[in-house]
Image (cartoon, coloured by chain):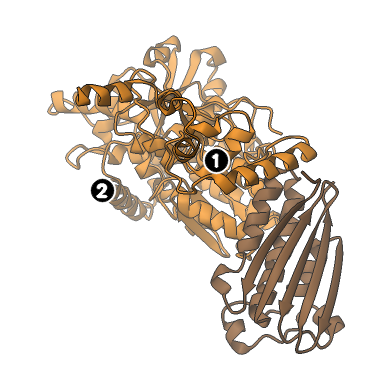
Amino acid sequence: MSNAITLNYHIEGSDFINAGNASSQIKKVLQQLNVDPKTIKRIVVALYEAEVNVVAHAYKGDISAEITTEDITITLDDEGPGIVDIDMAMTEGYSTASPKVREMGFGAGMGLPNIKRNVDELNIQSEVKVGTKVVMKVKLS
Amino acid sequence: MDQYPFHHALKFLDEVCIGCSHCMKECPTQAIRICEGKVHLMENRCVDCGMCYRTCPYQAIMVEQDDFKKVYDYQYRILLVPALFFSQFPDKYATRQIYSALMELGFSNIVEVEHSVPILIEAIKQYIQSSQNDKPVISSFCPAIVRLVQVKFPSLTENIMLLKTPVDLTAIYYKRRLLDMGIKEPEIGIFYVTPCAAKIAAVKSPVGERASEVNGVINMDYIYNKVLRILKNDKDEIKPFDGMKFVSSKGLRWSLTHGEADNFEGRCLAIDGIHNVITFLEKLEKEEISDIDFLELRACDEGCPSGILTAENTFITVERVRFRAAKYKRLEKESDHESKMLNFNQYRNYILEENQLEPVKPRSMYKLDDNMLEAMRKIQEVNEIMKILPLVDCGVCGAPSCQAHAEDIVQGKSDIRRCIFIQNDIKEGNPREFLEKVWGNKKLKKSNENEG
């Protein structure tokens, strides 16, 4: 047995109904590990936001979470349009979401800034027309 | 972690329980296991919602109550009665007659619980305004919900409104009034008629307060029977009680769904039914739902009228409570009506000062171990076990799901050989011996008799 737990999930683009599945599952594991509820909340809020980003913008994506006694590292790797200007995307209120997505209550331009607020480290790499890779890290103790 | 002992009002009667497992499958926090043909309750998970009591086909679950004789230990016996109690009886019995019947049981006065609601509404309005960062405010009214949040949604405990409930406030008010009349504290006995088990547990081991003002709890079904007997036997003689004070119409509606939420500004939602509440809180915890100001959450459908200790059909009760509230609302327009209500003015500040709960602490039911490394090892072990379990959640092992069984095994509380599918694979030992550990031997004996 190793000192890390790895969890993997798949996300389908445009499947808003099942967005949030990974955050629910990861929440339960963190609760089993007796992680502080406030830390769990930050992780779950950030991950849910990131999941919705993939569903709203990309065609499909994969999530992998690695949990150690020190921290949790979550990687969301998607195939999609990519982000043209990451700095712009980090600005509150900036959104490229389609009107259809906005009608569903998503796409307010708070996604990435909200993620950043809730995690300790955030790294975004993106290639236009290929996809985006978001890596977020939160300390657990 | 919360250090208060966790009191449960639901008691499983070993001599009646046959281990049929209906309750195990129904429990929303997976707090029930079957072992040796009986229910085993995981006390740290149970929130006293009463779903097990509702579903038990054998009446093997009872709701504990204080001995009614305890009432007579006190010289001044005050009975706090929820308004919905008066709506348990057929329309031909007037509310004031029901008051009289209750008085005949030996009480000094009958006081409806919801007299304190107007003052509580004021306090909640202020509370919502002042808690900008901890939105939504989750009502503390339903004790099963407060406990559910503690065990299942620990990150939301900070959202629980730290204000007392109408029964506490009315008890505080009435006790103060009697003390000010020169009556000594040991002579005052305040008793509460409860519609459910959770409220008993809340009196016996309150969350967020050191001790309740209530001296004893009487189950609504018990006192319903006593009152109905009096009403039926003395119908012609029973006089309407003339000391009745009018509760506010808002107070009357308080225990119904929307009874709280409709009083406040902003986005206020009312959700009833424990499974609906769980679904909602799952989304709230992820902030999938946000920008809500106030949440009224109740474990029972339609709120307290479907409490497990009520007697009348839920929907008939709701109809009668609404009818009474509408009637009182009309009366409230009369100029002298206020003089017919309990006067809280003198004690307003005192009650508002006393109306504070201590922070509610999380008590997560999911943790596998206090030590994180050990918990991690256990998760990995659970995952390994899950690979060989059938994932049909049949419950034959005595746990509500394969996942729960795997966790029990890892915690040393169960044996993988209790899984009937694994038994079939290993064909080692006598499978019946392992099943007997779960179901006892009575059921197996019975099937043998039938064969013979």
Q: Name the residue type under label 2.
A: Ile
Mark nearer the N terminus (1 vs 2): 2
Q: Is residue B16 visible?
A: yes
Frontmost of labels 1 and 2 is 1
Q: Quadrant of the N terminus of chain B?
A: top right
Q: Identify the subunit bearing mark 2.
A: B
Name the foreground residue: B271 vs A96. Answer: A96
Mark 1: few/some/many CA within 10 Å (<14, 14-19, 20+): some
SS state under label 1:
helix
Is B406 left or right of B94, judged from the image as shown? right
- Determine the image quadrant of residue B349: top right
Name the foreground residue: B372 vs B412. Answer: B412
Q: Quadrant of the C terminus of chain B?
A: top left
Q: Name the residue type under label 1.
A: Ala
- Provide the residue designation for mark 2: B316
Residue at 65% across, 50% down: A28
Picture disc at residue A7: none
Mark 2: few/some/many CA within 10 Å (<14, 14-19, 20+): some
x, y percent for residue B153: 62, 48
Residue ranking furthest to the left: B236
- The brown one among the chains is A
Q: Is residue B9 visible?
A: no
SS state under label 2:
helix
Name chain B's colour.
orange
- Provide the residue designation for mark 1: B404
Q: Identify the subunit bearing mark 1.
A: B
- Determine the image quadrant of residue A24: bottom right
